[in-house]
Amino acid sequence: MDVEADVIVIGSGPAGLTAALHAHESGARNVLLLEREEELGGILKQCIHNGFGLEQFKKDYTGPEYAERLIEELEKTNVQCFLNTMVVSLSPDRTITAVSPEKGVFHIKSRSVVLAMGCRERPRSSINIPGTRPAGVYTAGVAQRFVNIDGYLPGKEVVILGSGDIGLIMARRLTLEGARVKGVYEIMDYPGGLKRNIVQCLNDFDIPLYLSHTVTEIQGKERVEGVVVSKVDQKMNSISGSEQSIPCDTLLLSVGLIPENELSKEAGVELTPITKGPVTTETMETRVPGIFSCGNVSTVFDLVDYVAETGMIAAGNAARFAAGDWKKGRNPVEIIPGENVRMLFPQRYSFKDDLILFVRSAKPIEKPVNIELSPLGMRLKRLYARPNEMIRFKVSRDKLKAVTGPIEVSITER
Amino acid sequence: MNVEKKHFTCVICPLGCEIDVELQNGKVVSMEGNKCQKGEEFVSQELEEAMRILTTTVSIKGAKWAMLPVRTDKPIPKRLLSKVIEQLATIELHAPVRMYHVIVKGIAGTDANVVATRNMKKVNHPKNAKKDLISRKEG
Ligand code: SF4
């Protein structure tokens, strides 16, 4: 073995930075952070807008500030960071094969591993828009990188498909840089992004948001010359006769993010269709012992604070595992989505810690709701439930002691 | 009498109340939809002068990247956002720059400063040596 470690963290975005720092703070001696790019920080470096760390640090940081704060903390520790290092394989016995310009191909054996690879954007090919293949179609995150890091403006007349947060943020960013954003088109009948982004990124600049609309054709040979948008019915089929042609030179796609789990799969980590990430318990341990998962590789979170929180939990437990302080304990029980729950994380409970549960509603309910945990008979009250706002809550270990079978979580109107 | 209706979405908390306001000669005569007092304060501030934090970039030479992210250190009037962006487009910085280094003091006559939001080192082979970099004005 070329290198040995107690805890290896793969990826240095908000989840990985927090995890590396917290693994160190939890007593792991030999912590190694692997990053495939030439700098730490992951996606934070291009997210130059504010709104980061409101809950975690009670500060309104921009993405880069948030990253620098964690990086400065990390520099005070003996955590080793390998940059330009691409992990090419991970085996169930926690051996990593990686490659970097300095070291070539090398192997690392670690007592525990924290997966923090984050997510990637859904590309055009995953949404099947007919038409030509001209230049000028970008995912919102790629456009964000062009503008904020490389200094390129991707176009002058822009249509945005999908109302995810990055799309909304880019609508504002491009407008401020002098482009004209003609509209944001969302196939669902509710917006994908957070309300504060709808207000501060669209309403502030009079950018229209069209719900129940989608792009049905891309026009132009060399470069995008326009798109055709259509209304959709409740089954999300486009309504014929509602087509409208919109001249533009750029189409941005903000149609969702997918956890990046190629490495997890290779290590034999079981994934779930509920999150498209690894099945984990409240400790963030996957079904492969000693491999933990956190942040957007687990499930796509709305807030960086949640990403960091799962990073802390994963790292604390990975450090414990590495120290040999990891008891088998009771057999985990399943946590399953019930009525009106589209997403839930984690999916198992192993009786080791308090349970921090993240839930996403399947449809918007603008009325007071109960979030019910059965058969616990537990009810949490909320004023509303929206698919674009994850619900987070904590259930103490004491309350869960008596559970013997699966826990079902449902959201019902009060 | 000059009667006007306006709509606001309060962003003080995640609830995001939809607030309808009726104005007579610029004065609020009724407000509906806010679930708490803070919503009222939010609307008055929006009516008086909407304030926003501006985050953007400034071009930088001698660094690994072409652009340095910056922000105003406090909210500035929303109506000044484009003016500030234009003013910042004329600036060119040179690496290295430290986070929170003040780039423009009292931007556009406000008491807000524009500050760097990250550290950026000087490098020997900067990536922005590219000739084809489209300037923002040409778009
Ligand atoms: S009015 Fe009050 S409750 Fe409603 S969004 Fe504003 S702060 Fe929240």
Image (tube, coloured by chain):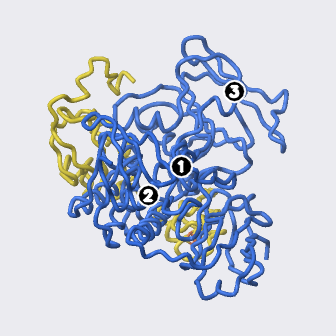
Q: Is residue A362 above or below residue B95?
A: below
- Mark pair 1, 2: CA separation: 11 Å
| Residue indicated by mark 2 | A113
Q: Position of residue A174 (x, y in %)?
A: 46, 36
| Residue indicated by mark 3 | A129
Q: Is mark 3 within 8 Å of ligand 1?
A: no
Looking at the rendered structure, the kind of residue marked 2 is Val
- Mark pair 2, 3: CA separation: 39 Å
Q: Position of residue A227 (x, y in %)?
A: 65, 24
Out of A22 and A14, give the one closest to the viewer. Answer: A22
Q: Which of pointers 2 and 3 lies earlier in the amino acid sequence?
A: 2
Graded by Cα atoms within 10 Å as few (under 14), some (14 to 19) or many (20 or more), the crowding at tag 1 reads some
Chain in blue in the render: A
Out of B4 and A154, give the one closest to the viewer. Answer: A154
Q: Which of pointers 1 and 3 lies earlier in the amino acid sequence?
A: 3
Which numbered circle lies on residue A267? Answer: 1
Q: Is residue B137 above or below residue A278?
A: above
Which SS class for mark 1?
A: loop
Marks 1 and 2 share the same chain: yes
Q: Chain of mark 2?
A: A
Quarter of the rendered image showing ligand 1:
bottom right
Q: Quadrant of residue B56?
A: top left
Q: Quadrant of residue A253?
A: top right
Q: Quadrant of residue A237?
A: top right
- Mark pair 1, 3: CA separation: 34 Å
Looking at the rendered structure, the kind of residue marked 1 is Ala
Q: Colour of chain B?
A: yellow
Residue B19 seen by the camera: no
Q: Position of residue A185 (x, y in %)?
A: 66, 38
